[in-house]
Image: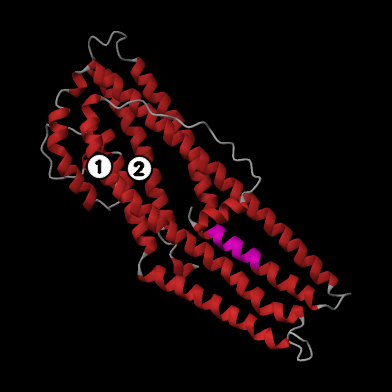
Amino acid sequence: MALHQIIQKLLLLGARLDPRSPIHPPAPPELLRPLIEVVRTAHGRFDELAMHFGNRYRSSFWTIYLLSAIAVLCAVLPLALGWDDWRHQLHPFAGFWTVGEVVIICTVGTIYWLGHRREWHGQWLRARTTAELVWYLPLLAPLVDFSRPSADADWYLRVFDPGQNLGEGTDVAAMCARLEPLARERLAHAWTNPQFVASYAHWTVGILAEQERYHHAVAVRQHALQHRVHSLNSWLFGLTALGALAHLVLHTLWLSLVTTFFPALGASLHGALAQSEAYRLGVTSERLSGDLHTAIQRIRAACEELPPQMAALPAAAVEGLKKAIEAALSLILEEHQDWHMLVMPHRLPLA
């Protein structure tokens, strides 16, 4: 478990996250299995890179913010403990707090330097985008018209508005070019095969339902994280105000510690929460979960337009099913583009 996940898990102790039961998508159509096998290896490679750099980037900014608050604590503790007084028996050790503060500041600088130099943020975005686009290629393949020659190797550019593609298409286009001969052979007469059409629609609904569950979980988690951090900040602000008022009566350096460290900790938590874009991620995921539910219902409705015995496939009904699946995939692409644009400006220098 990455450091940022541990921190968030600690922050969410006792929170009710309303988990949904896991969804196991149905088996994919036989015609798509070879494509899925080829894609699985490439997706695993990019997904591993995305997890690696994503964990490093998100752990780094949480660490930077929290260490900044701890540096304030190290600066104030010698005063609160009385070690700054030369008459105190532990006065010779007061310098250790200063050394600790310097070490923390150097650690923050090192994390920033490494993250900026090795481009954790940028590599995370590129790998995550590529992993997502590669993963959906088998689902997209039946929507591509391979009978018509195209100058674009990227299937996304051949099916969707180019604005929905994120521009990280070098690896995706290469994978499309690699898969195209196999896809053309396997899917040449797929839409005239009633068994394939039924299986493809059922499999698509399962994948979308899994995505709906995932985004519901993201929304619930982000809302819970916001609520918990805001609650902690309210307590920290309240204790700071109480300490400031008590300072009018009680003149003790421990109250200075409260009125110095608590605001710093609250600011650190708020800054890390803001950089993680918890609010907008929660709102976006909540909206997408609802949109995917609607998209699933449209696909099921399009399936009902097909003849019950599936002896024949009317062109209008097949086209309706294609459009419903294309619209659902478009939702996922648009959400990923929104996420990409949301987190792209948030590099470590902002922390």
Q: Is residue 33 above or below residue 233?
A: above
Q: Is residue 29 magenta?
A: no
In the displayed structure, does residue 189 sit left or right of residue 317?
A: left
- Location of residue 201 by image quarter: top left
Task: Tell me what residue is drawn at x 37 percent, y 57 percent.
Answer: 124
Task: Tell me what residue is drawn at x 32 percent, y 29 percent.
Answer: 325
Residue 93 pos. (x, y %): 68, 85
Q: Is residue 269 magenta?
A: yes
Residue assigned mark 1: 156
Residue 182 pos. (x, y %): 14, 34
Q: Judge by depth and name the residue closer to the eye, 337 or 81.
A: 81
Whole-Å distance between the Cαs marked 2 and 1?
A: 10 Å
Amino acid type at mark 1: Tyr
Task: Tell me what residue is drawn at x 23 percent, y 34 percent.
Answer: 141
Residue 94 pos. (x, y %): 68, 84
Q: Earlier in the sequence, mark 2 or mark 1?
A: 1
Q: Is residue 34 above or below residue 12?
A: above
Badge 2 marks a residue whose secondary structure is: helix
In the displayed structure, does residue 339 sit left or right of residue 19?
A: left
Q: What is the magenta segment's predominant secondary structure?
A: helix
Query: Do the residues bearing badges 2 and 1 touch, measured as CB atoms within 8 Å?
Result: yes
Residue assigned mark 2: 333
| Residue interval drawn in magenta | 265-274
